[in-house]
């Protein structure tokens, strides 16, 4: 039986990943900052929740010992430069060190489409730059670079576009906003995405752990769905599929960048996570669609699912 430690296993994607891993009959450990955050997974058979600060190198090293593989889904979408560096770059160093010392044989890193480990500084947002730097750290460690006393590990990096599914914070949020507002002012309306279903991403993690991909390690896989949409199309679709305004959805008005930035500043003043931050707007300066430079989900034997039938099912019930 494989033993897998899943960092970020309590989140939206993590809960689907953990469910698939326990279904394989594997034992799963999920570290969390607070046990109460683990409600989505703590009932799963063969899964152990551990309250732990994953940024504490000694604690993480202790936690990964005895595991065959580590999956990392820890990430933030909003924050300062220092927060992005801590969560996406420094944590990658901590993971790389812990896995090398403990002899963890496999690592699956969930990154993001648009990341580029070879040239992080050319990317438009703190999110993409830090995700790319995190990839680079793990890629170096995977091949054992810079360490004579430690072995590397098998590394799979998944780069998903925006992920949809019943608990997503994307289509659900835009549908909810249309319940509240008569029209929807939208920044970045022309940005293009290739949404991928959360179940396809979770299956991809399992397939990587099974060694299903014939690409050599470290391998990068672009996890995208079969269709490309603009942000405006996705927002309109979310309203329509949720049955808002008689199934027509609200009118979506594309904002020029200056107005989008003003909107982001105002959202930043409100408590809680903003729907759209300055850094999110920066990320959308480049399209979030497959580059074709790396294999897709087909390389893992997965045929990606179309968005509409799945999103209709959960948005119409929400
Ligand atoms: N959702 C998407 O559309 C999307 C698109 C592209 C890529 N991705 C990537 O997919 C992965 C999973 O995304 P997700 O949507 O499932 O994220 P999520 O729901 O926000 O979950 C992230 C998890 O990371 C942990 N976490 C958050 N901040 C942390 C911090 N400062 N220190 C330690 N742990 C922290 C949390 O665990 P605890 O609260 O239990 O500690 C949380 O469960 C991420 O790498 C993300 O970048 C997601």
Image (spheres, rainbow, N blue to C red):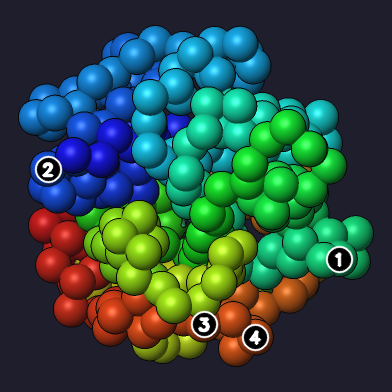
The residue depicted at 74 percent of the width and 38 percent of the height is 89
For residue 295, the mark is: 3
Characterize the local packing of mark 3: few (<14), some (14-19) or many (20 or more) Cα atoms within 10 angstroms: some
Mark found first going from the N terminus, 2 or 1: 2
Residue at image mark 2:
25
The residue depicted at 64 percent of the width and 16 percent of the height is 57
Vertical arrangement, residue 214 with respect to residue 80, above or below? below
Q: CA distance from mark 2 to mark 1?
A: 39 Å
- Does residue 12 appear in this view? no
Vertical arrangement, residue 79 with respect to residue 265, above or below? above
Dividing the image into 4 quarters, which one contains the N terminus? Answer: top left
Q: Report the front residue among 221 and 229.
A: 221
Characterize the local packing of mark 4: few (<14), some (14-19) or many (20 or more) Cα atoms within 10 angstroms: few
Q: For this view, does 209 lie left or right of residue 27?
A: right
Indicate which label's residue lies in the foreground, 2 or 4: 2
Residue at image mark 1:
119
Q: For this view, does 286 lie left or right of residue 314?
A: right
Task: Check disc 2 and report its element: helix, strand or loop.
Answer: loop
Vertical arrangement, residue 267 with respect to residue 206, above or below? above
Q: CA distance from mark 1 to mark 3?
A: 19 Å
Q: CA distance from mark 2 to mark 4?
A: 34 Å
Mark found first going from the N terminus, 4 or 1: 1
Q: Quadrant of residue 240?
A: bottom left
Q: Quadrant of residue 95?
A: top right
Task: Check disc 1 and report its element: helix, strand or loop.
Answer: loop
């Amino acid at each position: 039986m494989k033993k897998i430690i899943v960092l970020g296993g309590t989140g939206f994607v993590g809960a689907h990943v953990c469910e698939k891993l326990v279904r394989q009959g594997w034992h799963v450990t999920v570290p969390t900052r607070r046990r109460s955050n683990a409600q989505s997974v703590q009932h799963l058979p063969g899964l152990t929740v551990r309250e732990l600060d994953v940024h504490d190198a000694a604690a993480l090293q202790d936690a990964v010992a005895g595991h065959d593989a580590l999956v990392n889904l820890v990430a933030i979408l909003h924050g300062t430069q220092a927060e992005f560096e801590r969560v996406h770059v420094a944590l990658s160093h901590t993971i790389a060190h812990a896995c090398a010392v403990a002899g963890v044989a496999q690592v699956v890193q969930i990154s993001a489409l648009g990341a580029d480990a070879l040239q992080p500084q050319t990317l438009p947002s703190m999110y993409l730059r830090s995700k790319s730097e995190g990839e680079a750290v793990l890629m170096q460690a995977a091949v054992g670079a810079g360490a004579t006393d430690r072995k590397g590990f098998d590394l799979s990096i998944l780069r998903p576009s925006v992920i949809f599914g019943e608990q997503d914070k994307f289509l659900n949020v835009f549908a909810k906003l249309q319940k509240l507002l008569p029209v929807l002012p939208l920044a970045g309306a022309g940005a293009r995405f290739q949404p991928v279903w959360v179940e396809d991403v979770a299956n991809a993690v399992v397939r990587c752990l099974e060694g299903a991909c014939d690409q050599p390690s470290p391998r990068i896989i672009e996890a995208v769905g079969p269709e490309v949409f603009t942000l405006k199309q996705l927002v309109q679709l979310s309203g329509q599929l949720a049955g808002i305004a008689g199934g027509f959805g609200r009118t979506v008005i594309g904002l020029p960048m200056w107005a989008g930035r003003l909107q982001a500043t105002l959202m930043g003043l409100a408590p809680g996570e903003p729907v759209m931050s300055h850094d999110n707007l920066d990320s959308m300066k480049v399209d979030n669609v497959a580059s074709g430079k790396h294999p897709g989900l087909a390389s893992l034997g997965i045929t990606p699912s179309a968005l509409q039938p799945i999103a209709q099912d959960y948005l119409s019930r929400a």
